[in-house]
Image (tube, helix red, strand yellow):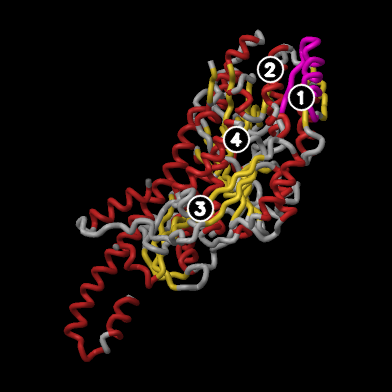
Amino acid sequence: MIARINRRETIALLGGAAAWPIAARAQPGDRVRRIGVLMPLDGNDPVANTYVSAFAQALAGLGWTDRRNVRMDVLWGGGDINRIRALAQELVGLKPDIIVTAGTAATAALQRETRTIPIVFAGVGDPVAFDIVPRLDRTGGNVTGFASSEPTLAGKWLELLSEIAPGLKRAAIMFDPGAPQPSAYIASYETAARSLKVELIIVPVQSDVEMEMTIIALGREPGGGLVGTDLFTVAHRASIISAAARNNVPAVYARSEFVRDGGLLSYGFDRVDLFRRAASYVDRILRGDKPGNLPVQFPGKFEMVVNLKTAKALGLAVPPSIRLRATEVIE
Amino acid sequence: MIGRREFIAGLGGAAVWPLAARAQQQDDRVRALQMRVLRLLVESTAGTIEGFIREIERQVGWTTQLPWSAGTLDQRRFDGLRLLRQVPPISEFAQLDSSGKEELRLSRLAMPVVGSGTDYSQDPKFTEAVAHRVYYGPVYFRRESDAYMTLSVAGTGRGSGVSVVEVSLLGVWNVVRLLEIGERGVCYVVDSQGRVIAHHFVGLALRNMDFSSLPQVEAARRKVEAARRGTSTGIRTPVMLGKDINGHDVLVAYTMIWGLYWLVFAEIPVEDADSLAR
């Protein structure tokens, strides 16, 4: 926008005779670059595919088109930590020019496999706490990217749950014990639970059955609710959403895909935006910048999605304080 | 100047001076145009950045219209939530009553705090806002690579409080990083201390760099000080020869954003200046 205004002014100034140099900066070379993409979710997950296409589209906008001057190999982890670790090894073995990934588990797995191939992550909870980078402004090594979240958000989810489900007494968090666990999030949940006078139930889960049992237990008495998400619960969200509906359990998730698929409420950063921004780092690195010189960036866009159909089915009135904050309302 | 000298040297000096004089005139005109282009770039960029901050200021302004005694906490909470919804760069909103005590704090990232009563009556975000209506805090890094600024706006009536917001400056960087200046020119913004708020290159933008020793930044900061003391009417976008961070000669134009006292620079390697008008 700015560049365009200035171009016009310059042309006016020179009497229209001169043309502004178009894309005068370093151009992509002729060689086809290989981009390895490790996505932690399933290849059939439409949302995960949205991320990959947003990334590819942003990259094309920067002059890198799949099958013309770049080749993208996308591997899918299916929400399974062991599979993600095996795929990380496989992907590094392909010796791509650069690797793009998402999530703490996949990033950590890739980093174990290579200290030389540049890795750009779109979404790691706390890259310093997980030893992925030593500092945010000078990452130094082969890894950089876009941090995804903040531990204080855990308190936010609990607050929103108590707001949309008055009379909340117990809230459960389900997570995969095999994945890296951010203890800072638990601390934030605990602080919020104390101030909201809600009992916090922390449940490790590794199967659909365990998740279903947890949700049935929550629904047995009024006042039960569900908060938060991790890689495993995102991959298995269909069973969570349907169990929550059947057992009348309100839930607040960190990711909007839950709500688009029928969950009640979500609040978190815009992941599509993160993948778009990741393309800018891939572009810089393919043009010669060192990943260690690119600082870790933070989410700029947040989204709150509320599903009114689900609220109605649960017998909940969505309060105005949530309505006015919602970036998307599903009716 | 440099260009002229080089040009004459190139033609073998004084022996060909009538020819050189004509070429020199032309060369001067080209140089003047190049300087004009740089000036326009820097002024329009500064205008966009100023617009970004002033728009936030305007949006915060309407949360201060009610005197503190009027209006319920619920109303203020709604105003705050709406503000966070409307203005994505704001990460936190707080309201201080007319004595500087915090009544309400809302955050995009954390739980709300009601009636903490924290005393900010001696804090510049309260005192400066009361004295001058608006206060722009120094740029700070919330985490090593995440630049923010505190902005506060006081209500106009007696007994009205002060609204305080924390503003992410990523939007400033987004203005600067997309700007193309000739082939290898760059734009950057520093605060009144010479610390980098935004730079065309991300590696220089998001890590709290200090540019105060660059000659153009030194010169500009002297003018900022004069403007702040009121001994000058401001900065009229000078163009000068400066140095880039690698010590190479650059042609550089700069201007100041009033109130914020931020400095916006556009620079291009001297030998590249021709690409400005190409």
Q: Residue B22 in the image: state x and y as whole percent.
A: 18, 78
Q: Residue A242 in the image: state x and y as whole percent.
A: 68, 17
Q: Using the rendered view, name the quadrant where residue A253 is placed.
A: top right
Marks 2 and 4 sit apart, C-alpha to C-alpha, by 20 Å
Q: Is residue A317 above or below residue A239?
A: above
The residue pinned by badge 2 equals: A242
> Which element type, helix, strand or loop, lies under badge 1?
helix
- Asked whether, in this view, residue B16 is left or right of residue A96, the answer is left
> Which element type, helix, strand or loop, lies under badge 3?
strand
Identify which residue is drawn at 64% across, 27% down: B104
> Which element type, helix, strand or loop, lies under badge 4?
helix
User: Which mark, by number, is residue A70?
Assistant: 3
Marks 4 and 3 sit apart, C-alpha to C-alpha, by 21 Å
First reached walking from the N terminus: tag 4 or tag 3 = 4
The numbered mark 3 sits on a residue in which chain? Answer: A
The numbered mark 4 sits on a residue in which chain? Answer: A
Kindly indicate whether the residue at mark 1 contacts the one at mark 2 (C-beta within 8 angstroms). no
Q: Is residue A224 magenta?
A: yes
Marks 2 and 3 sit apart, C-alpha to C-alpha, by 40 Å
Q: Is residue B116 visible?
A: no
Stretch of the chain drawn in magenta: A206-228
Q: Is residue A244 above or below residue B93?
A: above
> Which element type, helix, strand or loop, lies under badge 2?
helix
Mark 2 Cα-neighbour bin, 10 Å: few <14, some 14–19, many ≥20: some
Q: Is residue A251 visible?
A: yes
The numbered mark 2 sits on a residue in which chain? Answer: A
The residue pinned by badge 4 equals: A48
